[in-house]
Amino acid sequence: MNSMENANAEGHYKILVVAIFVGLFGCFFRFVGEAAIYSWVANAAMVVGTIIALKGVFAILGKQK
């Protein structure tokens, strides 16, 4: 698989879509209530979304020869 085929692989973009939804969930969940647990859950979702997004981006960039 050459680098162009790797960059256009559908699986990478599915991962990025999941990361965007997790990050948006974290962003919107921050405004659900005043309790500290909401903030913790929102921060955790944002961190997980960021990690998934970085995994997707590095998978696109990683397999170049």
Image: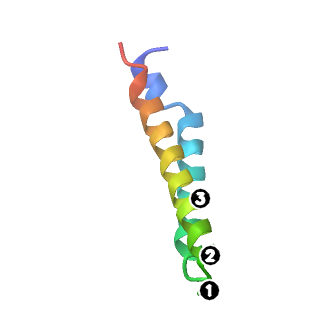
Quadrant in the rendering for residue 61: top left
Residue drawn at point x = 43 percent, y = 33 percent? 58
Q: Residue at x 53, y 42 (%)?
A: 13
The image quarter containing residue 64 is: top left
Disc 3 or 2, which lies upstream in sequence? 3
Label 2 or label 1, whichever comes before in sequence order: 1
The image shows residue 43 at horizontal and vertical percentages of: 53, 64
In-image side of 53 versus 25 (left or right): left
SS type, badge 2: helix
| SS class, disc 3 | helix
Contact flag, marks 2 and 1 (Cβ < 8 Å) = yes
Residue that mark 2 sits on: 38
Quadrant of the drawing holding the C terminus:
top left
**Are dots 3 and 1 in contact, CB under 8 Å?**
no
- Residue at the disc numbered 1: 33
- The location of residue 2, given as percent across then percent down, is 43, 15
Seen from the viewer's position, the closer of residues 48 and 14 is 48
Disc 1 secondary structure class:
loop
Tell me the kind of residue under disc 1: Gly
**Position above or below: 2 against 42:** above
- Colour pattern: rainbow
Amino acid carrying label 3: it is Val
Question: Mark 3 or mark 1: which is in front?
Answer: 1
Q: Nearer the viewer, mark 3 or mark 2?
A: 2
Report the Cα–Cα distance between label 3 and label 2.
Answer: 15 Å
Label 3 close to label 2 by CB (< 8 Å): no
Q: Residue furthest left?
A: 65
Q: Which residue is mark 3?
A: 22
Hey, what amino acid is under mark 2? Tyr
Residue 43 horizontal side relative to residue 63, left or right: right
